Image (spheres, rainbow, N blue to C red):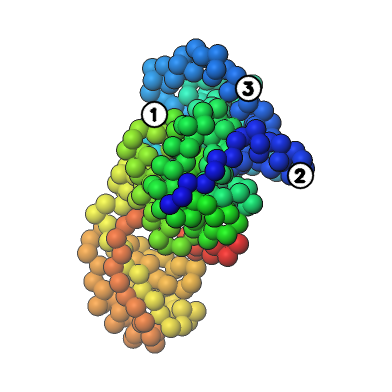
Amino acid sequence: MRRPDIVSAERLFRLGKKRGELRSFTGLSLLTIAIAVWMLVVRRGGGLFSEIDNTIAMSEVCIQVSGLRKSFGNVVAVDGISFEVMNGELFGFLGPNGAGKTTTINMLTGLARPDAGTLVVGGIDCTKNPKSAQHLIGVVPDESNLYPELSGYDNLCFCGGLYGMRASERRARAFELLELFGLAEAAGRKFAGYSRGMKRRLTIAAGIMHSPTILFLDEPTTGIDVQSARLTRDMLKALHRSGTTIFLTTHYIEEAERMCDRIAFIVEGRIVRTDTVENLLKPFQGREVVQISVSAPGMLNLQQLVDVFPEYGVHKGERGEIRIESPVPVKVGRLVRFLEEQGAEVTEARKKLQSLEDVFVRVTGLDTATMNKEKEKRAKK
């Protein structure tokens, strides 16, 4: 593969200024670019970075949030949340659309100022100066917004220039990441011509161009194909193994269960539960769940089912399916026969393994069908 000519950060600044379209890079504001330039000056001066890195190494807590609150007019987006993220942890922030996930990540990354509360990132108090820890973090926003007229390679080099990387460093790092993310053959192609999955991968690569200590990802696999989503998860797992602290917001319950060390559930701006995946699943261990689908659910009398099978917990799903929970083995055949005797046509009866989805429904009171609808909507955008 022929290596594309590097485009310097200075040249790109001039290009953007001339055309009047200097946009934010990976979700960072124009003010952030100014911060990045300031960081370059500090880096050349030396001293400060090693001191801050030592601060991170000395503390087990990487992110500490207390009483964080943010409102937009009369709408309370984040309502006094508190939590901690440990060094090297993959922390999941799980909730439906509009729960406050993106607002929280914007405050953590310096893109929004909290109305109240305290915020410490990497040992640095960011409460009064939200951008003071930005040199430690990488940000992957929920939508890819790199420069469409630049190639994948040039976009990565531009990112490296913003973070003060020397030309030789950013060239080497760009090629390393393009190879790692399976984009080497598309390095010289314009970003506008990338598929949705390729755009997502390049946006993540841009977020880790400067090898950040902490990585924030907002819905990293939403709206991309299965293969790209799998590759993205593999890359995140590799970063996690290398010691990078990862803060992941998502409404993909299965993804959070598969990847995260700990998970916080947020609903309507409030955190309702935070724990390890193992501890979240403990209350459901030893319980059997059977899901039964019938052709005409509206004709069922659930109370009759409860009366005949008092040992079972009986619930009706949003789509009319019957959910049976029991601490003892469920006699599926007996259940099916009873329903058929009542005139119902059973189309499916299957046992389900307990999952984080069950925990989510129990803790938040929300039906996962709502989350599934949101996935479909976002995937179509």
Q: Which residue is mark 2?
A: 19
Q: Which residue is mark 1?
A: 87
126 w.r.t. 1: above or below: above
Please identify, in this view, whether the residue under mark 1 or under mark 2 is nearer the observer.
2
Residue shown at 63% from the left, 22% from the top: 38
| Nearest the eye: 240 or 114 | 240
15 w.r.t. 183: above or below: above
145 w.r.t. 66: above or below: below
Specify the quadrant of the image occupied by residue 269: top right
Residue 85 position in % (x across, y down): 43, 31
Residue shown at 36% from the left, 82% from the top: 346
Please identify, in this view, whether the residue under mark 2 or under mark 3 is nearer the observer.
2
Residue 289 position in % (x across, y down): 31, 63
| Nearest the eye: 97 or 184 | 184
Left or right: where does residue 191 sit relative to residue 176?
right
Residue 161 position in % (x across, y down): 57, 33
Please identify, in this view, whether the residue under mark 3 or under mark 1 is nearer the observer.
3
Q: Secondary structure at mark 3?
A: helix
Left or right: where does residue 133 sit relative to residue 329?
right
Residue 252 position in % (x across, y down): 45, 55
**Label 3 – label 1 distance at C-alpha:** 26 Å
CB atoms at circles 3 and 1 under 8 Å apart? no
Q: Which residue is mark 3?
A: 38
Q: Secondary structure at mark 1?
A: loop
Give the number of the disc on residue 184.
none
Labels 1 and 2: the sequence-earlier one? 2
For label 1, count other residues whose C-alpha is less than 10 Å away and answer few (under 14), some (14-19) or many (20+).
Answer: many
Specify the quadrant of the image occupied by residue 254: bottom left
Q: What amino acid type should be assigned to the residue bearing mark 1?
A: Asn
Q: What amino acid type should be assigned to the residue bearing mark 2?
A: Arg
